[in-house]
Structures are given as C-alpha cells and as structure tokens.
Amino acid sequence: MTSPNESTKLSHLPEDPILRHLRLTLTRHSPTEGFPGYLVVAQDITQLKLRIEELDALNHVASILNSTHDLQRVLELAIERIGTALHAEAASLLLRDDATGELVFAVAVGPVADRLRGRRLAPGQGIAGWVTRPRKPLLVPDVSSDPRFSAESTRPVDSSPVQSCAFP
C-alpha cells in the first residue's frame, strides 16, 4: 500500500523511434483538509531517450575498440552500432586510398552491403567525395534532388539512399 504523498513512477518507452517517450508520475495526495486524490504529471523525455541512445552507442563503440585487434572487425562493429543508433537502414564507411585518391567502401551494412564493399569513388564523386574537399559534414534530407548525389557509383542494383549524412 502506498503512503500519503508517495510517488509511483511509470514509464512507457516504445521501441518505435517515431513515437514520443513519456514518463508518467502518479502522486497520491491525502491532505489533512479537503478531498484526497491523485496528481498525474506527464513529461516528454523523447530528447533524453535519444541522448541516452547516442551515449550508449558511443560507449558501445569504445568497448568495440578495446575488444579486438582486428581493425576491419572493429570498423564493421562500429558502423553497425552507429547505424543502429541513427535508426538507419544502411550505413557505410569509405576510406581514402592514398595511392589513387579514390574513396573505397571499406565497410557497408544493410540490404546491398555485399555489392558496395570494395567499390571505388573518384575524388570528388558523389556526396561522400564532395565532403572531402571542403572537409565539412553534410546532411542531405533528399538525395534524389541533390546534384552531388551520384547514383551510378552508389547504386549497384535498384537501391539508393533516401537521406545521407557524410563526414570528412
């Protein structure tokens, strides 16, 4: 049984990232005068939940870095975790080939990952190539309308990203 003015915290944190995350606090109020009752306070903790997910992803990546000496495996695990944290359907890591200046898909996760790994982009080609020149991150909400998007280099079959974020 709850005592007077005792708070009970209820939390509903749905898996779907589109839904809001709410924390409900139910307080039983038993005043010495007046009517007893309950007070319900709802707090939107969506931003807090997202921040916790981001920090959890960083913590997970840090543990990956300490878990193995196999660089390729570390990169794969890190990109998988980052993709999950961003709720991305696919993610990739391109590394610069110092001999040619090309960007090489070193890690790819998602539906067409096998067809992307090892592909090369000419210097400056596509969104990934573009960010290497000004060395600034870029978020493209709709790649189909962006002139920097290179469908030929990143679409191996019938798959192309809808959104893209790239970091030099």
Image (cartoon, grey):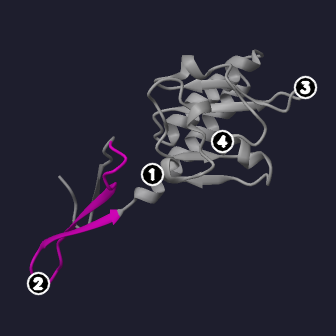
Within 10 Å of disc 2 (Cα), the crowding (few <14, some 14-19, many 20+) is few
Within 10 Å of disc 4 (Cα), the crowding (few <14, some 14-19, many 20+) is some
Q: Which residues are magenta?
A: 16-43
Q: Which mark is residue 49?
A: 1
Q: CA distance from mark 4 to mark 2?
A: 69 Å
Closest to the observer, 11 or 168: 168
Q: Quadrant of residue 25?
A: bottom left
Q: Residue at x 55, y 36 (%)?
A: 151
- Number of the front mark, 4 or 2: 4
Residue positioned most to the left: 35
Residue 131 on image: x %, y %: 73, 48
The answer to whether the residue labelled 4 contacts the one labelled 2, judged by CB atoms less than 8 Å apart, is no
Image mark count = 4
The answer to whether the residue labelled 4 contacts the one labelled 3, judged by CB atoms less than 8 Å apart, is no
Q: Residue tagged by mark 2?
A: 34
Whichever of labels 4 and 3 marks the residue nearer the N terminus, that label is 3
Q: Which mark is residue 126?
A: 4
